[in-house]
Image: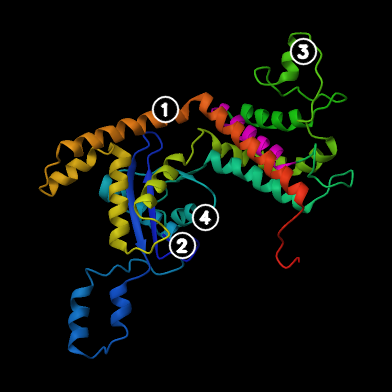
Amino acid sequence: MTRGHSSKQGVVTTIGMQKGKVLDTETKSKSCKSCDYWKKQDPNSEKFRLWQANHAQECTLTYEGSSGGMEAAGTCDIFNRSIAQYRLRYTGFVGDGDTNTYKKVCDQKPYGDKVIEKMECVGHVQKRVGTRLRKLKQTTKAQDKKGLGGKGRLTDKQIDKMQAYFGNAIRAHSYDIVSMRKAVWAVFFHKKSSDEDPTHSFCDASWCPYLKAEQERKPYTHSSSYLPSAVMDVVKPVWKDLCKTELLSKCLGGFTQNQNESLNNMIWMLCPKKKTHGLKVVETAVAVAVSVFNDGCTSLMAVLRKMDIEPGHFCRLYCAQTDVFRIQNAQRQAKLATKEIRKARRQLRLGIEEHQAAREGHPYEAGGF
């Protein structure tokens, strides 16, 4: 719950890939204030024995182990009870590849010999491109003995573009691994092209300006948005590693964890991470967030009625307006024009930041000054 790997509470959620609804949740806690208090008291006293006899049902200590292991433990619990509680099996697992959760679930064999298929989140695979290329830029020089970074070379802005093109290629060809690999390699060869060596054979005329100009029989000059061969030859081993069939085949279907990130945002807005909360508070925040996520804000009125509280006129009006605004905002964010504006704004910000960093030099380095 708190930031970092020393969390006292953790939340695990399972969301259906087809419908995008929350199916199950599990909340883990490493702390119990009552236990911490009574451990310091006399274990032979009458008060201690009375507390110990009644505390088992109220104890909030539900997990013992490292904070990083909460995700795997919670996911295993969800998989193990799916048949008994919901009479279903989770046959696919869309993960981000950041933890060993999938391995832990498979080791427990919740469905016997039934294999749980591992699929990758396209967004997280796309992020690997940026991570690998930024690390490469810091540690490697190009074949012309110059740094990979700098004007007209592998800048942060260029890396961001390549990362976005990599993700777009996967999403546009999520139905076929052959066309997906071809589209991903098209990004590499497109960026490597020059007037002397135009390598656009894998490109598509729908997005490649060189092929468009060729179809219209117009001359085309490669601009500074293309990268030198000396730089791309160093990038090629990284790109080849990211284009392996074993990895791309897990991206078939184009699944993402966007719904999960949206739900997480709702949970921690209700239960901010900058404050310390107990298990009951976190569980309440999860329950409210899941209700709103699945059925909208109007679902909370059913909760009030269960508590013998009849929602008034303004309560009903607020819930209805909130749901309408939420839908309108989602539709606006999904529009192509809005996405293009967000992309352009991000590219401009990266360009300004890189220009300022180049002008000022490196203002920070651990122990470097």
Residue bearing the label numbered 4: 99
Which residue is identified by label 2? 69
Quarter of the figure with residue 20: top left
Q: For the residue marked with disc 3, what is the amino acid? A: Glu
Q: What residue type is labelled 4?
A: Thr
Q: Which of marks 4 and 1 is in front?
A: 1
3D distance between C-alphas at marks 4 and 1: 32 Å
The residues bearing labels 2 and 4 have C-alpha atoms spaced at a distance of: 9 Å
Q: In which quarter of the image is the C terminus?
A: bottom right
Mark 1, residue position: 331
Residue 313 placed where, x, y %?
A: 15, 36
What amino acid is labelled 2 in the image? Gly
Sequence order check, earlier mark of 3 and 1:
3
Residue 32 numbered tag: none
Any mark on residue 214, and which?
3
Residue at left offset 28%, top offset 50%: 287
- Which SS does the magenta portion mostly show? helix
The stretch of residues the image draws in magenta is 155-175
Camera-side mark, 4 or 3: 3
Q: Marks 2 and 3, Cα distance to the nearest angstrom?
A: 55 Å
Q: Which residue is drawn at 49% across and 38% down?
A: 256
- For mark 2, does the 10 Å Cα neighbourhood hold few (<14), some (14 to 19), or many (20 or more) residues? some
Element on which disc 4 rests: loop
Q: What element carries label 1?
A: helix
User: Is residue 68 depicted above or below 292 in this figure?
Assistant: below
Tag in front: 3 or 1: 1
On screen, residue 142 versus residue 115, left or right, reads right
The answer to whether residue 169 is magenta is yes
Q: In the image, residue 262 lies at what x, y percent?
A: 42, 42
> Are dots 4 and 1 in contact, CB under 8 Å?
no
- Mark 3, other Cα within 10 Å: few <14 / some 14–19 / many ≥20: few
